[in-house]
Image: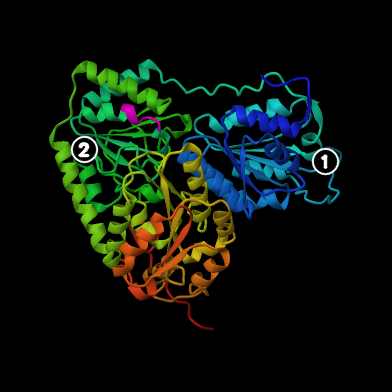
Amino acid sequence: MPDTNTPVTVGAVVAAFLEQCGVKTAFGVISIHNMPILDAFAQRGAVRFVPARGEAGAGNMADAYARSTGSLGVCLTSTGPAAGNIAGSLVEALTAGSPLLHITGQIETPYLDKGMSYIHEAPDQLTMLKAVSKAAFRVRSVETALGTLKQAVQCALTAPTGPVSLEIPIDIQSAVIPMPADLSPLPVAAPVPSAAALDALAERLAAARRPLLWLGGGARHAGAAVKRLQALGFGVVTSVQGRGIVAEDDPGSLGAYNIHKPVEAFYQTCDAMLVVGSRLRGNETLKYELKLPRPLLRVDADPAAEGRCYATDAFVCGDSALALQGLADRLEARGWRADAALLADLKAVHQQVVATLHDGLGPYATLVAELQKIAGRQFNWVRDVTVSNSTWGNRELRIFEPTAGVHATGGGIGQGMPMAIGAAIGAEATRSGRKTFCLAGDGGFILNLGELATMVQERCNLVVVLMNDQGYGVIKNIQDAQYGGRRCYVDLHTPDYAQLCASLALPHARCSDLAQLPALLAQAVDRQGPFLLEIDMLSIGAFKSAFAGPPTNTVQQIPALGKA
């Protein structure tokens, strides 16, 4: 029970409430406009605060912490420019559906919204935050501070989950009040699917002989129900966000090999697909032209998902775990089983597309194999947007837990390394024993380079695999494929990473010959703490197959402009 007799700041109330929410770690940048909360963190000693070097990196850290632990991520920023700095990270968390609480300071209430050019004020900041968050709230009085905070956390954790921003003016943060007696969080209800809708869904699927499950990030907690449907003969394919719900060495799963031509042909031999907790994003459906099986059935906690991206033949609104458990109950009661040939055909097409991908890697097939070998089964696999991730990282390494994979879903470069910091700290907080591996490209890596200092300071247990080709590899390939080979603005001056890492006391090794790789990986993994393994792509060579942007069914050629 909280001590209600001792006066405390509202900042201390915020800290005490977050503790009741089970928050163990928060990320951010200290400022005059969030110091009452951070002072309370330090005084109370229950929440670890990770001081990032920039708000963008801090938001990515909190996002990845949330995804990799399956819990609430928390990030604190200052107001004005600092709140603007985190906007890109909030867009990423919104795209990924990460439950994240972003607490930002705000200027003193007597000067707020007066157009007085007060330092750190951004005009109409709340509207900006609403545009990049699931929701945004402002604490408008001392009396409503705790209630608004409770509402913000409940909103972030309610499906469809997402980032929620909360403004707390500095005079309210520093106000002194009695500690409230009730610091319990508000309940988070799982939407219950209607029995009639589940009956109708079961009726449709009972008529199928070759059904597939397409699992998205909204089904991460539904693994037990998925196993029951697999036992009835359902095949599985996942979005990139749904990776690991079914272990990716399961012979009944395609993993995230979801758009390859042989897989699309295989879809046409199936007589139903149930999409669960997935947005069917454009870059995973060939811009919505991927031919999916019919009938196309969907389960989603978001009622607006019905008919979005693809016409829906039947829709169940509800929590994915509850819906799939209810569906399994009904199909088991009928004694229904899928055609046994489905899984044999699925396994064959999976082997085909994996072999094609590995062949296209050229020399880098060795890198994938060695990484998989040394990572084992218990690791975090965090990826930035880079040609290597688009070529193989989004499908290999294979992962075995639904919280093990973290990637920049929204397509923004440079977010992978701070995400890896968040995932590594999450592994430490939950004592999962996972080593974190981060796949990054040199082009994006520069964007959050300052967070290398955070990585070293926090002793993050992670290995950064930095694919260095001294340029924007994906853009080069797009220019070759669509712009007649006219390359511009893609060659980058890059640091000497050996010298840079030495200045930060960050262990580093450069691999210029893949024969060196097993020994270098062993050196990296054996260390407790951070390690940067630089892959010298200019020395090793190119991929056999070039990745030239998100896949589509057509590639437009852009003609050169004539000179005047």
Residue in the picture at 51% in, 42% down: 65
- Tell which of 308 and 264 is nearer to you: 264
Q: Position of residue 368 (x, y in %)?
A: 30, 58
**Vertical order, 536 against 26 (above or below):** below
Q: Residue at x 38, y 26 (%)?
A: 321
**In the drawing, does residue 313 fall left or right of residue 479?**
left
Q: Is residue 335 magenta?
A: no
**Disc 1, disc 2: CB below 8 Å?**
no
Residue pictured at 56% horizontal, 21% vertical: 187
In the picture, the disc for residue 270 is 2
Q: Which residues are magenta?
A: 221-225
Q: Relative to 478, does residue 316 appear above or below in the rendering?
A: above
Which of the 4 image quadrants contains residue 175? top right
Q: Earlier in the sequence, mark 1 or mark 2?
A: 1
Mark number displayed over residue 354: none
Q: Amino acid at mark 2?
A: Cys
Of residues 344 and 562, the one drawn nearer to the viewer in this rendering: 344
- Residue 345 position within the rendered picture, expressed as x and y whole percent measured from the top left: 15, 42
- Work out how far the residue at label 1 is from the one at label 2, CA to CA, in angstroms: 61 Å
